[in-house]
């Protein structure tokens, strides 16, 4: 008795035999405890994913197509021997050995040297199954082509084997998933993965990639790679650990990594948890499926559909429909195809009927008639169009056939050169095919150009597909984009968002999948303690900073020439500000300055007109004229501070103001000193009589003014003022100003002016009690009190304010201090000259002195 019988196989003889170990049938396999013969306890109640029978049919279709093509292997026939792996390691090894040693032809008299003409083997979609096969086939150097995904690291481990990869690298899949999540800003996603080594490896690779791109896994759930629905404790445990966390998850996007069997398990768990899930909108999610998955159901689930996965985005191997494939499928009948050991199981489970058995009584209504039509089956049980996985198997057959063809031609040419000897097929060995498979370029019957590169892989990317389901349990896959990391820059990831069909709950709007609502512009993300980095609160930006996009990690400052908006969500260009002649404040200051200048000019003209009167002649007439002219210039110099700062105005305004004011204060000081000296000279025996006259007054004015002029010359020669823009002082304006150059020199100029003012005030204060008829000390004292008060108030005010108002304060101080001198010193005299001329006589002054 065979310890491990193989219940299904399909054999067709040929000159060269292509083996296949595919996966479509499963059994509830149990551990062997050696209490009974293994063959008695292995197989019971097989379950079949009938949709995967197309993989077998695609392989047979390709071989038959090649046998009919005179351009490939003329006069040579390809055969095949196809087994199933049954999702089991033991059976994979068992069927692989059968490919090597089980003979399907009769040899008269037993010969030990008889062998099987196995040329190459096509492996399963599962990389695990393919690598199990490679452990055996690599010993015999038999080429093996696997049609599923492969992992670059695994390829390196198996580099010494004879395995080839017609499917794309899983590295491409990982990049595609990341690009897809980033494109739709899905930062809070769940993950379902098959509970095996592949699933664990996928998690270890994907999780760091997600973190590097700011994406968090809200949920990680593992799906059993096999199931046993007869064990209620097992079913309950799987349900509690898988379905309930999924139902409570806040993520709207889920990634599923595994195979179609794992997907049927998930579908079953969701159905068990909520049979009316079609009405439960909260369970409708966006699913992202990996390329190993096809939407297939077992015969027990035929009443179900995939409406729950409506709108799924999946990654699929690019495929083209070969001509004649659907006609080939329509020609399949259970009583017509001899040798197909899978067909009986497929037909019964696909159409829910039974082959009649003479030993069993079967209800006539359940008998398979053989006239059932494959096109009547829903897509979850069987598809008439060639699927992507079937297309990979189809291409694998063509790759092997072309390699054998080139090898045969190469050997034939060698034989011809040696004497026209005919090539014997037995001379062609499987190991000789490797050098032709690696680097081969060929066209299949669908017109696609294919090749294996020097790394034994077919380097393609993925098509991005969108699943659209219909009420009649059918579905359609719509191509919405591509993933190809080897494409030119900018074309690695292409998706047509407007073509995607979403779950109805999303109203055809791109779904959100985030841990919390995004932070609006003007706010920044703030980490929540104890939670993943994708979960955060929102904090407003501090004053002076902005965030212009959603979910900003931090707030930033605007450029110096910009300032934040009211909501702190953007920057506004600052306006250039300066004290203009056209604005109300500028007009007011100009009007005051010109009015005071006119008044000063009137007073000067009046004094010149009455120059011979005692009031004008008293206390040095020349100094009086100089003081009036200086005050006139003071009023006019304030106009230099108005308007947009220019190089000339910046160069002149502070130096002109300081020198003119120094002359004015010097004149006041000279007048005060003149009064004091004149009074002292009237005393008998006074030695100060020689100082009375113009010499002393002129000396005071010239010496004091020259000192200030010297300071200004040094200032302008070393670090003169220049036009500048101050973008930091004010929030919403850039101040056009005159940079004083050397701040030290600026304060030295003001300090010297203040020193002269204090000296003048002190001298005038000491002379305030002298007789009124001979001096104006009281008026000078009062004028200097006003002058000093104005400039003492100016300093803190000037320091505390910014922008054009600094200039306004300085102009105001110039005008007020000059007006104080003008009004206090000259208004009494002007009153006497103009309104009381009878008092402006020498006799009156002498009388008042007495």
Image (cartoon, rainbow, N blue to C red):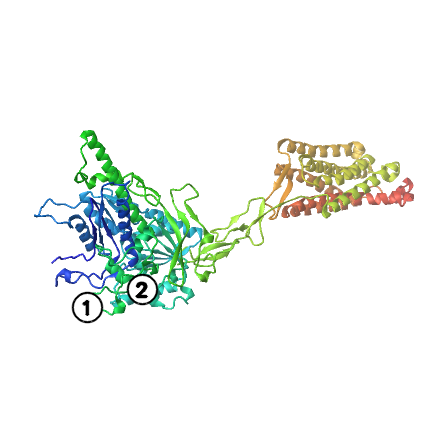
Q: Position of residue 407 (x, y in %)?
A: 23, 37
Q: CA distance from mark 2 to mark 1?
A: 26 Å
Q: Position of residue 135 (x, y in %)?
A: 20, 47
Q: Nearer the viewer, mark 2 or mark 1?
A: 1
Residue at 20% across, 55% down: 91
Is residue 153 visible to us here? Answer: no
- Judging by the rendered image, the residue that carries numbered circle 1 is 360
- State the image quarter where residue 143 is shown: top left
Label 2: few (<14), some (14–19) or many (≥20) C-alpha neighbours in 10 Å: some
- State the image quarter where residue 467 is shown: bottom left
- In the rendered image, the quadrant that contains the C terminus is top right
Disc assigned to residue 301: 2
Q: Position of 111 compared to 717: left or right?
A: left
Residue at 19% across, 68% down: 360
Q: What is the total number of numbered labels drawn onto the structure image?
A: 2
Q: Position of 752 compared to 27: left or right?
A: right
Secondary element type, mark 1: loop
Q: Position of residue 575 (x, y in %)?
A: 63, 45
The first of marks 2 and 1 along the sequence is: 2
Label 1: few (<14), some (14–19) or many (≥20) C-alpha neighbours in 10 Å: few
Q: Nearer the viewer, residue 34 or 373?
A: 373
- State the image quarter where residue 772 is shown: top right
Q: Position of residue 475 (x, y in %)?
A: 38, 58
Q: Nearer the viewer, residue 286 or 53?
A: 53
Q: Nearer the viewer, residue 359 or 682?
A: 359
Vertical position of residue 431 compared to residue 311: above or below = above
Q: Position of 753 compared to 319: left or right?
A: right
């Amino acid at each position: 008795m065979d310890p491990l019988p193989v219940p299904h196989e399909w054999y067709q003889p040929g000159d060269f035999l292509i083996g296949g170990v595919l996966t479509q049938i499963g059994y509830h396999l149990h551990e062997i405890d050696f209490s009974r013969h293994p063959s008695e306890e292995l197989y019971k109640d097989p379950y079949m994913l009938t949709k995967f029978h197309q993989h077998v049919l695609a392989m047979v279709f390709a071989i038959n197509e090649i046998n009919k093509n005179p351009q490939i292997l003329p006069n040579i026939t390809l055969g095949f021997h196809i087994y199933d792996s049954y999702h089991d390691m033991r059976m994979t090894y068992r069927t692989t050995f059968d490919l090597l040693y089980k003979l399907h032809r009769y040899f008269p008299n037993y010969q030990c040297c008889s062998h099987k003409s196995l040329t190459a083997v096509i492996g399963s979609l599962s990389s695990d199954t393919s690598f199990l096969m490679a452990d055996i086939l690599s010993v015999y150097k038999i080429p093996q082509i696997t049609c599923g995904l492969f992992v670059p690291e695994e390829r390196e481990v198996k580099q010494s084997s004879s395995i080839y990869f017609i499917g794309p690298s899983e590295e491409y899949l990982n990049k595609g998933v990341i690009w897809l999540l980033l494109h739709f800003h899905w930062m809070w996603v769940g993950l379902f993965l098959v509970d095996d080594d592949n699933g664990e490896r996928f998690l270890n690779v994907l999780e760091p990639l997600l973190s590097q791109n700011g994406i968090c896994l809200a949920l990680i759930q593992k799906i059993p790679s096999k199931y046993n629905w007869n064990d209620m404790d097992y079913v309950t445990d799987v349900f509690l650990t898988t379905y309930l966390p999924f139902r409570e998850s806040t993520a709207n996007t889920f990634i599923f990594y595994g195979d179609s069997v794992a997907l049927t398990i998930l579908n079953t768990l969701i159905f068990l948890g909520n049979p009316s899930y079609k009405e439960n909108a909260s369970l409708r999610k966006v699913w992202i499926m990996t390329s190993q998955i096809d939407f297939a159901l077992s015969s027990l689930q035929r009443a179900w559909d995939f409406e729950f996965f409506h709108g799924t985005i999946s990654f699929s191997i690019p495929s083209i429909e070969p001509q004649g494939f659907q006609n080939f499928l329509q020609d399949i009948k259970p009583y017509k195809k001899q040798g197909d050991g899978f067909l009986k199981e497929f037909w019964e489970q696909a159409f829910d009927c039974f082959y009649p058995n003479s030993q069993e009584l079967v209800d006539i209504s359940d008998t398979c008639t053989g006239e059932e039509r494959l096109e009547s089956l829903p897509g979850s049980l069987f598809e008439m169009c060639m699927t992507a996985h079937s297309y990979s198997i189809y291409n694998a057959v063509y790759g092997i056939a072309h390699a054998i063809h080139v090898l045969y031609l190469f050997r034939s040419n060698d034989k011809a050169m040696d004497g026209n000897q005919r090539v014997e097929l037995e001379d062609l060995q499987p190991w000789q095919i490797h050098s032709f498979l690696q680097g081969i370029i060929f066209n299949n019957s669908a017109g696609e150009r294919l090749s294996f590169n020097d790394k034994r892989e077919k380097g393609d990317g993925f098509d991005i597909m969108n699943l659209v389901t219909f009420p009649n349990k059918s579905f359609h896959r719509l191509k919405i984009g591509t993933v190809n990391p080897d494409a030119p820059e900018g074309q690695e990831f292409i998706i047509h968002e407007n073509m995607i069909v979403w779950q109805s709950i999303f109203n055809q709007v791109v779904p959100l999948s985030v841990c919390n609502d995004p932070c609006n512009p003007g706010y920044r993300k703030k980490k929540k303690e104890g939670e993943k980095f994708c979960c955060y609160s929102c904090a407003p930006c501090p004053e002076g900073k902005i965030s212009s996009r959603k979910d900003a990690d931090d707030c930033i400052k605007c450029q110096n020439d910009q300032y934040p908006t009211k909501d702190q969500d953007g920057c506004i260009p600052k306006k250039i500000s300066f004290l203009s002649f056209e604005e109300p404040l500028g007009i007011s200051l100009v009007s005051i300055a010109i009015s005071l200048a006119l008044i000063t000019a009137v007073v000067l003209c009046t004094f010149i007109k009455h120059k011979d009167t005692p009031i004008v002649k008293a206390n040095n007439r020349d100094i009086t004229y100089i003081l009036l002219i200086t005050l006139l210039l003071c009023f006019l110099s304030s106009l230099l501070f108005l308007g947009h700062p220019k190089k000339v105005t910046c160069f002149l305004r502070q130096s002109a103001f300081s020198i003119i004011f120094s002359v004015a204060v010097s004149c006041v000081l000279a007048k005060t000193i003149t009064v004091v000296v004149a009074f002292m000279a009237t005393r008998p025996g006074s030695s100060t009589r020689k100082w009375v006259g113009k010499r002393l007054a002129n000396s005071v004015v010239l010496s004091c003014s020259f000192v200030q002029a010297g300071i200004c010359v040094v200032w302008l020669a070393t670090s003169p003022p220049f036009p500048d823009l101050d973008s930091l002082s004010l929030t919403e304006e850039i101040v056009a100003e005159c940079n004083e150059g050397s701040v030290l020199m600026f304060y030295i100029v003001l300090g010297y002016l203040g020193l002269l003012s204090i000296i003048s005030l002190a001298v005038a204060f000491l002379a305030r009690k002298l007789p009124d008829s001979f001096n104006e000390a009281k008026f000078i004292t009062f004028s200097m009190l006003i002058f000093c008060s104005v400039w003492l108030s100016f300093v803190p005010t000037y320091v505390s304010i910014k922008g054009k108002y600094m200039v306004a304060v300085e102009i105001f101080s110039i005008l007020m201090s000059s007006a104080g001198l003008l009004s206090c010193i000259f208004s009494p005299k002007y009153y006497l000259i103009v309104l009381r001329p009878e008092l402006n006589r020498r006799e009156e002054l002498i009388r008042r002195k007495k």
